Image (cartoon, grey):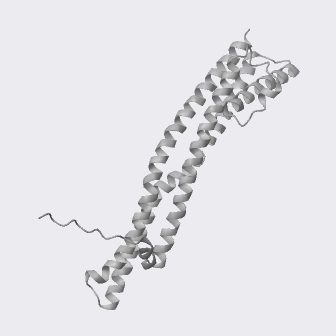
Amino acid sequence: MLAPLPVFAVVNIVEVFIRCDPVGQVITVLLGVFSVIAWAIMWGKHRDLKDLRNLNLRFEQQLRGERTLLDQPEAARQQRSIPYADLFADAVEAYWRAAAIGQEKGEDTLRARLEHAENALQRALARQILRYESSMVFLASIVSGAPFLGLLGTVWGVMTAFSEAVSSGAGGIKDLAPGVTAALLTTIAGLLVAIPSVFGYNYLFANTKRLITELENYASALADRIELESKK
């Protein structure tokens, strides 16, 4: 005869949550809120990075077809929402600002112009890197903090269950099981928040680093092109 199939108990999460003490319920709800925030950050960050890269590529292609960068019209420097355009605008404006001040003082030199353009590029680059890395710190905090928050709820719940068992004089497994089960809910909630978040964070971190590298390469190429054009 075939052995009977094992019967798995179906855990009612709502009942387990109701059996939790107030501390466990607060932690579980808080982890649920963190989960929603983490998914919102991951989805929004993925979409933003994708959009920024597409905008950057289109702007770079547009400039590649221009014979000169220094003589571009004012409209070309008004697209500040595009990271590449922001770097371009700062570099060109700093170049011509240094030229105007140098001519007023009678000290206009190519070296001064290029130094001001490079300094402006570095400032714009740092500003855009901060933009790329925005929200990543909060997501990393959720990744690292959710398991510990869940563990805190479990330890608190187990301690409460044993304390109540001692007070009532009951020490059997049947008496402790409901409290311990409720306490473990916070650990499960913490892992359910942390596991998707850590994969999402690693994916976004890799994408962010790739875009920052592309931004740094663009800044270097832009500086080289401005220098070459200014020497003609």
> How many numbered markers are drawn?
0
Which of 78/16 is in front? Answer: 16
User: Residue most toward the bottom?
Assistant: 168
Question: Residue 88 location in percent, x, y?
Answer: 71, 27
User: Residue most toward the right?
Assistant: 104
User: Residue most toward the front?
Assistant: 1
Q: Quadrant of residue 171?
A: bottom left
Q: Quadrant of residue 121?
A: top right
User: Residue most toward the left?
Assistant: 1
Q: Check the image and report above or below for 169 versus 202.
A: below
Picture residue at 86% right of the left edge, 21% below the top: 105
Picture residue at 63% right of the left edge, 32% below the top: 54
Question: Residue 16 location in percent, x, y?
Answer: 41, 75
Q: Quadrant of residue 215?
A: top right
Q: Check the image and report above or below for 156 versus 132.
A: below
- Going by the image, does 216 lie left or right of 177? right
Question: Residue 158 location in percent, x, y?
Answer: 36, 75
Question: Residue 170 location in percent, x, y?
Answer: 29, 88
Which of 101/90 is in front? Answer: 90
- Going by the image, does 96 lie left or right of 206? right
- Going by the image, does 50 lie left or right of 13? right
> In the rendered image, which quarter contains the C terminus?
top right
> In the rendered image, which quarter contains the N terminus?
bottom left
